[in-house]
Image: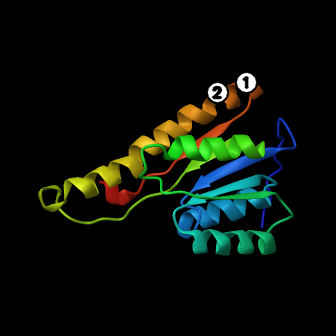
Amino acid sequence: MHTMKVRFKSPEAYALVTGAASGMGRIYAIRLAQMGYNLVLVDINEAGLAETEKIVKVKSQPVDILVVPQDLAASDAADKVFEKTEEAGCAVEVLVNNAGIMYCQGIAETSERMLKLIMMVHMYTPLMLCRKYVTGMKQRGVGYILNISSLSAW
């Protein structure tokens, strides 16, 4: 496997991955840890986060891991995640907005509650996370943001 050398602005560089409890989020977390990033793992699924943390520890070099169980549909989700990373002193250099909800139903048949949940997880919270972390990235002179979308969006 090819390992890319990464030059961090600081040795305390963290990568924050939403939807890290399973699927692509877990894969992003593993790969970023293999690249040498410390991790902030965010998901509503606490058991899945614990499993991701275990897998990362087996498959990568030793890195610091902050686990943040959070419902990203909550209106203050980005604030809560940001506060936890600030309290822990995590310099987030990479933000991967990966969390998503798979829901296949016509818009007319979808409840307003479900539409709001989808919009919060797919649009509002990722936007607010970008807003929260980009300031620090600019100040440090380094930062990367990856916003994931699915082909099912089409």
Q: What residue type is labelled 2?
A: Thr
The reply to whether the C-beta atoms of the residues labelled 2 and 1 are less than 8 Å apart is yes
SS assignment at label 1: helix
SS assignment at label 2: helix
Could you tell me residue 112's position as x and y percent?
A: 21, 53
Q: Name the residue under label 1.
A: 139
Q: Mark 2 points at which residue?
A: 135
Could you tell me residue 64's position as x and y percent?
A: 81, 57
Could you tell me residue 17's position as x and y percent?
A: 61, 54
Residue, x 76% and y 46% (percent of image)? 88
Task: Assess disc 1: are there few (<14), some (14-19) or many (≥20) residues with their C-alpha within 10 Å of its C-alpha.
Answer: few
Number of the label disc, if any, that sits on residue 13: none
Residue, x 69% and y 30% (percent of image)? 136
Q: Which residue lies furthest to the top in this view?
A: 139
> Can the viewer see residue 92 in this picture?
no
Q: What residue type is labelled 1?
A: Gln
Residue, x 82% and y 40% (percent of image)? 8
